[in-house]
Image (cartoon, grey):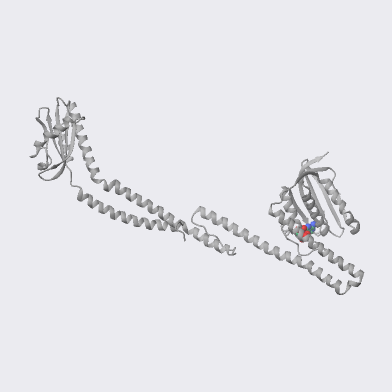
Amino acid sequence: MKIRNLRNTVWMYFVIFISSILILIWFAFVASLESNYKSMKTRDIVSIATYIMNGWNDNNFTTDKLDEIAYENNMCVLIENGLGYTLYSYDMMGNNCLIHGIYSFMLYRYRAEALNSPNGYYYAEVDNPQFNNETLLFVMVVGDKSTPDGFIYINTSLVPLKSTSDIIKRQVMWISIMFFLLGLGVAYLLARLIEAPIVRITRSAKKMAQGDYSVKFDGHGYTETEVLADTLNYAASEISKVDNLRRDLIANISHDLRTPLTMVKAYAEMIRDLSGDNPEKRTEHVNIIIEESDRLATLVSDILDLSKLESGNDELNLTEFCITDKIHEIMERYKLFSEQKWYKFIVTAEERFVAKADVVKMQQVLYNLINNAVNYTGEDKTVYITQIIKDKKTARIEITDTGDGIDPELLPLIFDRYYRAEKSKREVIGTGLGLSIVKQILKQHNYQFGVRSEKGVGSTFWFEMTGHIEK
Ligand code: ADP
């Protein structure tokens, strides 16, 4: 089994997807937890300092409001005027506060930093030496740096995040592992689900390949696989039809080849053993041999014709010719036949109709239809060949006999390959391929064709050619 099958691929992509999401969460959230916290604090301080500044300029901030902000943010705030006098002071942190505690002497250094900085403020993370805890100190110059209006000091403690972040990290790790395992499971199920109809169809296809055309393809689950299954079911039924046809064809053809061959052999033996010396008998027997050989030859050439036509490689050789003339020409050849065997051919074709078609093939169509009519016509031995001009562009050729007609339920079958009605009326040379050749040729030309037949009255085979009347 290859590694890159559908299930593994789906599974792999799903796992990659989950892993990248978890990694992203880890980096975006857990790993940057501390730095995020610090920058958040800094942002808070800057916004409060800005608030104070604005209040200073507009002269409208109240100490109540400042108290509230300082309390909420857990801050220590000191505002001095330019001369260093305290204007406002708030202590939330007690001894932890750098501003009010014993380390307040350090403030001058940070004030100097703020005065030197281009934007007038300075902040730093400063460890309170007494308690060794981290705090964030912010100093801002109010007004012009050379003659400052005042100074704002803000100090806030940075909660030791390490232990908190460790706890969170551990939790997130557990959750990640759980999600990962869950994801693996879901991915596996998903892959199985996607794969299932394909596996089912493949199983059926294997059976079909072994010659079992009765298999049913089951693709339920997805539209795509259902369509695939339907298509395969259709293919299976078509293949099975062709398979049956092939079997019938071989059976029929071998039967038909054997019959004349048996006759040829029997009569040849007869000549050898009995009639060789009797010229009359011998001629009779030799004639039978010749007739049977003819029959064999017809059968073989019909099979060849049909397979050539059906292979689709046989291209039409289109030329303009007069079909009316062609009919008369063919009837000339039946003349001998009509004189010797008392057949009557009644041809009705007045206007000359010209069509662009394959002459040789259309001639074969006419021959096959007329031969059939001759073979199956009734006691009056009459065959009608009629050309009807339907409109200026279409001529309809009809070949009618006065035979027994064809059973309505057999009508749709007679154009099929190798179909022959059970009872043959006369000593008819037939292969059962004549009409399928006719059908192939007419279809190739895109001509309409058909048959109507009435029991006890006769049959009419017709086709329609397109072309024009010649003046
Ligand atoms: P075949 O060589 O047997 O005539 P065809 O393909 O020409 O083969 O015809 C198929 C079958 O159709 C024939 O066996 C016959 O049963 C029926 N058929 C064809 N033409 C006629 C007709 N003019 N009258 C009655 N039956 C016909």
Give the position of the C terminus as an image quadrant: top right
Q: In front here: 28 or 56?
A: 28
Q: Is residue 187 left or right of residue 302?
A: left
- Report the image quarter containing ligand 1: bottom right
Residue 271, by quadrant, is: bottom right
Q: In front here: 461 or 37?
A: 37
| Residue furthest left in the image | 102
Residue name at image x 22 percent, y 51 percent? 166
Q: Indicate whether 271 appears above or below 466.
A: below
* Place of residue 136 in the rendered image (x, y in percent of width and height, measured from the top left): 17, 40
Q: How many marks?
A: 0
Residue 47, by quadrant, is: top left
Q: In front here: 378 or 293?
A: 293
| Residue furthest bottom in the image | 273
Q: Is residue 387 left or right of residue 120?
A: right
* Place of residue 89 in the rendered image (x, y in percent of width and height, measured from the top left): 11, 35
* Place of residue 56 in the rendered image (x, y in percent of width and height, measured from the top left): 17, 28
Q: Is residue 175 left or right of residue 444?
A: left
* Place of residue 235 in the rendered image (x, y in percent of width and height, measured from the top left): 60, 57
Q: Indicate whether 419 appears above or below 163.
A: below
Mark yes or no: residue 366 visible: yes
Residue name at image x 24 percent, y 43 percent? 35
Residue 71, by quadrant, is: top left
Mark yes or no: residue 63 visible: no
Residue name at image x 43 percent, y 54 percent? 10
